[in-house]
Amino acid sequence: MKEKNSPSAAVSETNSAEANESSIEEGVQRQWQGVVKRRSFLKGLGIAGATLSATALLGTEATRKPREAEASYPR
């Protein structure tokens, strides 16, 4: 029978603890990468929405003025 305090048992416990820490760190890394990707996506949506809104407002102003000018000229 092997003894509990044998060097091979201590090495296997150390390796298993290191593997467990490594897998936890990988899980945390994946989680943060997902958060960063989600934030970048939402930021992009916000910028696109603001751009489209500004374009729509400027577009209506630009198209309204020539029509008003045309209405003032007699036909």
Image: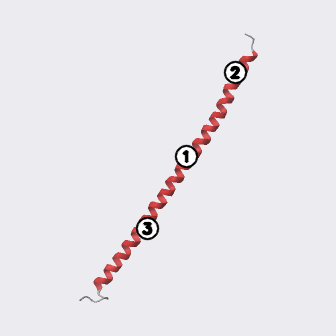
Q: Position of residue 20 (x, y in %)?
A: 39, 72
- For numbered disc 3, what is the local secondary structure? helix
Q: Position of residue 27 (x, y in %)?
A: 43, 64
Q: Compute the Cα span from label 3 to label 2.
A: 63 Å
- For numbered disc 2, what is the local secondary structure? helix
Q: Compute the Cα span from label 1 to label 2.
A: 35 Å
Question: Label 2 crowding class (10 Å Cα cut-off): few <14, some 14-19, many 20+?
Answer: few
Residue tagged by mark 2? 67
Q: Which mark is residue 44?
A: 1
User: Going 62% across and 35% down the picture, which residue do you hit?
Assistant: 55
Q: Is residue 19 left or right of residue 47?
A: left
Q: Amino acid type of disc 2?
A: Arg
Q: Compute the Cα span from label 1 to label 3.
A: 29 Å
**Quadrant of the image occupied by residue 9:** bottom left
Q: Earlier in the sequence, mark 1 or mark 3?
A: 3
Residue sticking out furthest to the front: 1
Q: Position of residue 35 (x, y in %)?
A: 51, 57
Q: Earlier in the sequence, mark 3 or mark 2?
A: 3
Q: Earlier in the sequence, mark 1 or mark 2?
A: 1
User: Going 48% across and 56% down the picture, which residue do you hit?
Assistant: 34
Q: Amino acid type of disc 3?
A: Glu
Above/below status of 23 relative to 55: below
User: Going 33% across and 83% down the picture, which residue do you hit?
Assistant: 10
Q: Amino acid type of disc 1?
A: Gly
Q: Is residue 72 left or right of residue 51?
A: right
Residue sticking out furthest to the left: 1
Above/below status of 29 relative to 44: below
User: Going 31% across and 79% down the picture, which residue do you hit?
Assistant: 12
Residue tagged by mark 3? 25
Question: Label 1 crowding class (10 Å Cα cut-off): few <14, some 14-19, many 20+?
Answer: few
> Dots 3 and 2: beta carbons under 8 Å?
no
